[in-house]
Amino acid sequence: MTQTAAKPAAAVRGRRLPGDLSKRAQIDRILRVDHAGEFGAQRIYAGQLAILGRKPCGKTIRHMQQQEEKHLAAFEKLIVERRARPTLLHPLWNVAGFALGAGTALLGEKAAMACTIAVEEVIDDHYRRQHESLGEDEAALKQTIEEFRAEEAEHAHIGREHGGEETVGYPVMRAAIAAGSRLAIWLSERV
């Protein structure tokens, strides 16, 4: 378990340390970032579909986009129910997500799938850490996160099956997209 995924010893014993988030702040942060992430993901797929929608891979991309739309709808509902503030970066993720999807799709189907692999691997890890950080008093949220995590892992698998790892420059592309995804998560948690 990474240091960021582990609960501080004081928190495990029920005490908070200076700088630890309150439970309310932790839930707000989780809902804000997951809502932003699912919005960004469906925008990535929209960008890919704008370029590849009529190609044979369009059906596969559409399937993944539909799952992301389901995830987004769930987090939109939770944000309202739990009165969490959405990220202020929503307009940026609208443009950046579409641009990333369209840009990688312009490089070809394999590059679009490489994008999917990179993003979804980061999200899989992100959801895993969130799941581990939540207590049993958040069983419903944990279940939602775990269900969506499984679908994100499926998307990464689909990307591999469709040759994403074979795209020219894959290691560099994967590293750059993964770093951008981690930065987007960090920013969306806070802004």
Image (cartoon, rainbow, N blue to C red):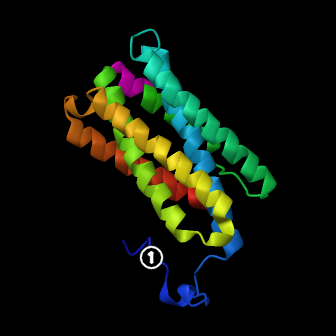
Question: Which quadrant is the C terminus positioned in?
Answer: bottom right
Name, please, the residue furthest toward the top.
Answer: 54
Q: Position of residue 176 (x, y in %)?
A: 31, 44
Which residue lies at the image location 73% right of the left edge and 56% below the top edge?
A: 85
Which residue lies at the image location 67% right of the left edge and 77% below the top edge?
A: 22
Q: Secondary structure at mark 1?
A: loop
Name the residue beneath numbered marker 1: 6
User: In the rendered image, is residue 191 in sight?
Assistant: no
Q: Is residue 141 left or right of residue 64?
A: right
User: In the rendered image, is residue 101 in sight?
Assistant: yes
User: What secondary structure prevails in the magenta region?
Assistant: helix
Q: Nearer the viewer, residue 11 or 138?
A: 138
Q: Position of residue 132 (x, y in %)?
A: 50, 67
Question: Which quadrant is the N terminus positioned in?
Answer: bottom left
Q: Nearer the viewer, residue 186 or 60?
A: 60
- Quadrant in the picture for residue 138: bottom right
Segment colored magenta: 102-106
Q: Position of residue 123 (x, y in %)?
A: 45, 49
Label 1 is placed on what type of residue? Ala
